Image: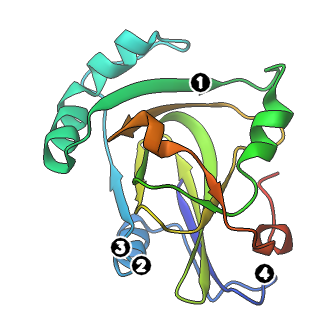
Amino acid sequence: MSELRVFDEGDGSRARVHTRDFDTIRRELGEVGIRFERWEASRPLAPGASQEEVLAAYEGPVRRLMTERGLQSVDVLGMVPDHPQREAMRAKFLEEHTHSEDEVRFFVEGQGLFSIHKGGRVFFVLCEKGDLISVPDGTPHWFDMGPRPSFTAIRLFTNKEGWIARMTGDDIASRFPRLE
């Protein structure tokens, strides 16, 4: 189940908001410009489904979002707990960074924790199966896939080259809990 915790940026020990209610999560995130939706597959997917099968199952919502937002490309990323590069891949996004385009992710299965630093607060968004999140370009954030990542996500891009992470140099991510 999706979860939102909101912290003051100076205190990662106590959440001001803690909820698993979808409507509350969507409202809280929407107030700071973060899109949060729930999608359903048009057909059942077997574990380990191919990229083509995943994209076919979500063709309607993917096409709608691509048209609405002018997104140009899409792919599917899968991570498994025994992936040989899981530690390096996890570490790559655990530092606060920004992108020059929106970071748009849909969780087909599994989970991941987006931490968004905005307006003096840190929004922890635990995304799970069925969740779409869109973090606006230029928004400082970090992503934690956990020590034993297990997820499949659809990634949507305006321009894959624009999706390069630019580290902010702020060590704020080190002062907040991780996904364990």
Residue 116 image-quadrant placement? bottom right
**Residue drawn 69% across and 63% down?**
96
Question: Disc 1 marks which residue?
Answer: 78
| Alpha carbon separation for disc pair 4 and 2 | 18 Å
Q: Which mark is residue 33?
A: 3
Left or right, 119 with respect to 58, comes to: right
Establish if 26 lies above or below 36. Answer: below
| Alpha carbon separation for disc pair 4 and 1 | 29 Å
Establish if 159 lies above or below 174. Answer: above
Front residue (pair 106, 143): 143
Nearer the observer, disc 4 or disc 3?
Answer: 3
Residue 80 image-quadrant placement? top right
| Alpha carbon separation for disc pair 3 and 2 | 9 Å
Front residue (pair 54, 160): 160
Mark 3 touches mark 1? (CB < 8 Å): no
Residue 145 image-quadrant placement? top right
Amino acid type at circle 3 is Gly
Amino acid type at circle 4 is Gly
Location of residue 119 in the rendering, given as x and y in whole percent from the top left corner: 52, 87
Amino acid type at circle 1 is Gly
Location of residue 60 in the rendering, given as x and y in whole percent from the top left corner: 18, 31
**Residue drawn 40% across and 64% down?**
22
| Alpha carbon separation for disc pair 4 and 3 | 22 Å
Left or right, 68 with respect to 101, comes to: left
Q: Which mark is residue 162?
A: none
Q: Is residue 55 visible?
A: yes
Q: How crowded is mark 3: few (under 14 residues within 10 Å), some or many (20 or more)?
A: some
Q: Residues within 10 Å of mark 1 (few under 14, many from 20)?
A: some
> Helix, strand or loop at disc 2?
helix
Nearer the observer, disc 3 or disc 2?
Answer: 3
Q: Residue 12 carries which label?
A: 4
Q: Earlier in the sequence, mark 4 or mark 3?
A: 4
